Image (cartoon, rainbow, N blue to C red):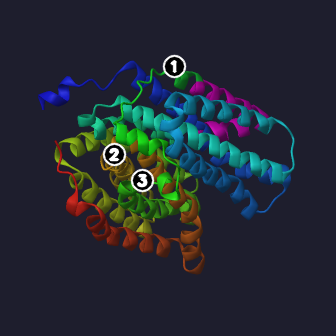
Amino acid sequence: MAELQKEKLWTKDYIVAAISGLFASMVFYITVTTFAMYAVATYQVNESIAGLVAGVFVVGSACGRLFSGRYTEQIGRRKVILIGGVLFFVIGLAYLIPMPIVAFLVFRWLHGVSFGMYHNALLTVATGLIPVSRRGEGLSYFSLNFVLATALGPFVGLYFIHHFSYPALFVACSVLALLALVLGALVKIKPPVFTEEQLLHLKAKSTITDFFEKKALPIAVIIFIMSICYASVTAFVDAYTIQMNLANFASAFFIIYAIVILIVRPFGGKLLDRKGDNIVMLPSIAFFAVSLLLLGFADNKVLLLVVSVCMALGYGNILTAGQAIAVNSSPHHRISTATSTYFIFNDLGQGVGPLIMGMIAARQNFSAMYFVAAVIIALSLALYYVLHGRQARKGH
């Protein structure tokens, strides 16, 4: 216990990196929330193309993470942060230029690539700033910037398009991207120390397997499944609440979700450090399954609020605990690759989730969709135990 207290977590660089992550993530959530509407208003496209405008950014992000995960240590963490950050800022400015829909989709993809590069490199740097014995706690605190972005991003985006204009929104996103870049550049990055064998591995000719960290794959598979089911919430809970005659209550759902995560997630990180992986992951998966089951039965505001709390205790803890597990399971020189592997699977789950779950909702209804998601998560308890839980770390 005393050892944990001796190692400092809240350094200036750690805080600056977290704020940089907040600004970058806000741009992500602002554009994902508003750009489908922009496509419809500007290009008069149908819903499928409008959805592609949002989805192509996520695909680009996965591509950027793939590159960043493999080459960050070879190129240098600071260089990747600067390259990714500059591209993220400049490509965001390009939205101000009128262009055909095909060109707009290309820029959306490139914007996603630059975000994936920057975000993955920043996470790698942040992981290096955290004492190993406090990694779960440190990543839990650090990831709170993403939680704030999920609430602030959509709010800012919708406020701008309702009170100003889309060009004003593009400028606001560019300002946030510039702030993220400046803060990221201010972080003092201590060069990682690798063994001769690790350096040889980093310099070796790349193969497809070098872009993924195999020791992070088991937990990456779990987060892929979790994210598919969570995407059923982000994509359809608004329509579901409207169907229940609770229009506009979805915003309250996510606000409560964010508040609960802000409160409980740091405790989950400390628990993971001290007691091991299973003490956090097993109850969190169970909470997530329960939240989806209750969501299928929900027909009033009180039950929806209970669902949001349970989901925060579930998926809200799973996402960060899984990242800590991916990093802790991997060699030191592969931390960047482990981080990208984990979040690529998360991004893919978020990308295909609406399609898969939407097919179930179209054939049945939203309630049936959430019941199916609850069963999938419940079965994932056994899958987690087989893939990771039975040999999981026991804590410090």
Q: Give the Cα separation between the discs numbered 2 and 3.
A: 9 Å
Q: Is residue 179 magenta?
A: yes
- Quadrant location, the N terminus: top left
Q: Nearer the viewer, residue 185 or 247?
A: 185
Give the residue drawn at x 69%, y 49%: 109
Q: Are marks 1 and 3 in contact (CB under 8 Å)?
A: no
- Near mark 2 (Cα within 10 A), the count class, few <14, some 14-19 or many ≥20, is some
Of badges 1 and 2, the one in the foreground is 2
Q: Is residue 175 magenta?
A: yes
Which residue is labeled 2 in the image? 331
Which residue is labeled 3 in the image? 213
Give the magenta range.
152-181
- Near mark 1 (Cα within 10 A), the count class, few <14, some 14-19 or many ≥20, is some
Q: Are marks 1 and 2 in contact (CB under 8 Å)?
A: no
Q: Give the Cα separation between the discs numbered 1 and 2.
A: 27 Å
Give the residue drawn at x 38%, y 48%: 323
Q: Kindly give the residue lying farthest to the bottom in the view shown.
A: 363
**Residue 5 at what x, y percent from top left?**
18, 26
> What secondary structure is found at the residue carrying circle 3?
loop
Q: Earlier in the sequence, mark 2 or mark 3?
A: 3
Residue 221 vertical placement versus 69 (above, below): below
Which residue is labeled 1 in the image? 186
Q: Which mark is residue 15?
A: none
The amino acid at mark 3 is Glu
Q: Residue 29's quadrant in the figure?
A: top right
Q: Is residue 280 visible?
A: yes
> What secondary structure is found at the residue carrying circle 2?
loop
